Image (spheres, helix red, strand yellow):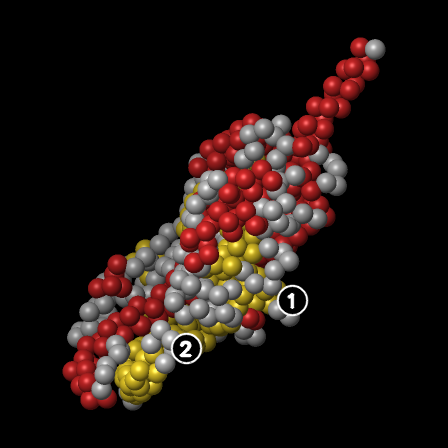
Amino acid sequence: MKKKLLFVIVLFCYAISFAQSTNMDRKRFGVSYIKLPSSPILDDSKRTFSTNSKFISLYGFSKVNSGASLDIILDYQGIAVDDYDIVKNKVEDRDSDGKLIRTRYEYQVIVDYNSRAAIQISNSLTGESNQEHYLENSIFKSGIYKSYDGAKKYYAGNATAIKKRYRSEQWVRLIRRIKSDLNEIYGYVPFEIKNETFLILSSKKHPEYVTHQKLFDEAESIFDRMKYNEPIDGLALRLKPLIDSFEKITTKYTGTKRKERKIRHASYFNISKMYYYMDNPEEAKKYAQKIIDNDFNLSEGRRLISLADRLKERLDVNQLANRHFDIVTEDLTNLDYSDVPEEDNFQELKQQKEVDIPIIAYLITTANDTLTAQISNTNISKIGYTVDVHLKGDDNNLQPNTFKAEEINTLALANGEIYKTITFDEVSTGTNVPGPKLVKTLHESDQITLYVFNDKELILKTPNSDKGTSTLTPDFVFGIHKKLALYAADCPKLKTRAQNNEFKNNQESLLEFCKALSNCD
């Protein structure tokens, strides 16, 4: 009798353990390593370059006056200004009943500014020489004027100042792009980020919660010791018991239910990340494949496989076992360059970071093609109706490309951010444009997804809805408790919480609501 009772208790506890919520947090940690070039000079004693520009620099190289392996000539071709155009717009003023009161016209000056530059790269080691061309375009739009003459007078009095401003801004962007591309091809760039993520249980009642929290604390502490110029063998040894612990968790949850697959997914994800940053792409890829086989989040598995493949490719082409070693970057010249006209003030350039380091991005198009690209931090902030990236062309050189939102299904960034193309009526810009837009995923489940557009407009979307709903609409602003109660109709406890105004119309509170709905049993 006692044995039977004990057996029942064990079964009960086992059932309770699986009934626990499996909410996951993406907890951040930092890493540091050398970004390896795509076309390296393997002999570090020959990593030298000469240039006619004081703004050109290469990490891991010595700048010399002559006899360099690479000779980089910058040809800045100045700025071109198109003829200005004064656009006439018809405006109809109507009363509250829609009756036309008056018709008037507004005038606005529009001008195109284009700056061009080219670099000639000669490699004395291979005898190769190639040229790259760069273009920066800006469209100036003035304020609104009541008369044609008013708009014309404004531009006539400010044309010189406007041209000078755009010339300075476009020069800065040209130089940043050129330096970024050169370092992508040849440079050994020290790289440090603080926003890599592990998947860690946030549900305190789950049996693995304490273990997960402890494992993250230990992993974070180990990665905090990582330096780009120091060996990582010792770190790898310290991570091995953590990897074993995550592996052990997968053997405890072997069922096919969603919560069990979610626990396994987190373990495989964390192990793959550890191996990736320990410069072991083969093992990282092995666990990324387990993510796919586990059938919980296939896109994350595919993304980690792509990262592992690219890492292996870069290690192989650089004939290196890891991305952690010391580099020498020095300027051995005392030349007086004159590639920038004296009348222009480029003080802004001096305030920029030495290199605007791009990150890897993966685009899944509507045709289901997966493209590997690079995107700069500047362009990440502009993701919306379009996204600007660099793709490798047929000549293996990076070329700028712009994709419209309707051409993209998913945009995954190497920093862990995921963008999706959805349709919703935007409110934040005041334009109410209804078409598809790229939005960043904050939370995604088979119950509800929370996105953010333009870093300020939150959008909710359910799987059975073709459109998302902005939380800046009047219905949400004045009646969020009613709207959220509708979303939680099949989750009585959460519905009651919503009706009691427990949730606010902000990112933190809506994220809490979405997580609660996604884990409602």
Report the number of numbered marks: 2
Closer to us: 489 or 193? 489
In this rendering, the label closer to the viewer, 2 or 1: 1
Q: Residues within 10 Å of mark 2 (few under 14, many from 20)?
A: few
Which residue is most to the top? 2
- Where residue 221 sits: x, y (%)? 46, 33
- Where residue 199 sits: x, y (%)? 56, 41
Q: Amino acid at mark 1?
A: Asn
Closer to us: 468 or 232? 468
Classify residue 19 by image quadrant. Answer: top right
Q: Is residue 519 visible?
A: no
Closer to us: 330 or 305? 305
- Where residue 213 sits: x, y (%)? 53, 31
Q: Amino acid at mark 2?
A: His
Residue, disc 1: 368
Q: Residue sitting at 27 percent across and 74 percent down?
A: 166
Secondary structure, mark 1, is: loop
Looking at the image, residue 188 lies above or below residue 263: below
Residue, disc 2: 133
In space, the residues marked 2 and 1 are separated at their CA atoms by 31 Å
Quadrant (top left/top right/bottom left/bottom right) for the C terminus: top right
Viewed as shown, does residue 280 lie left or right of 260? Answer: left
Secondary structure, mark 2, is: strand
Asked if disc 2 and disc 1 are in contact, CB closer than 8 Å, the reply is no
Q: Residue sitting at 48 percent across and 40 percent down?
A: 500
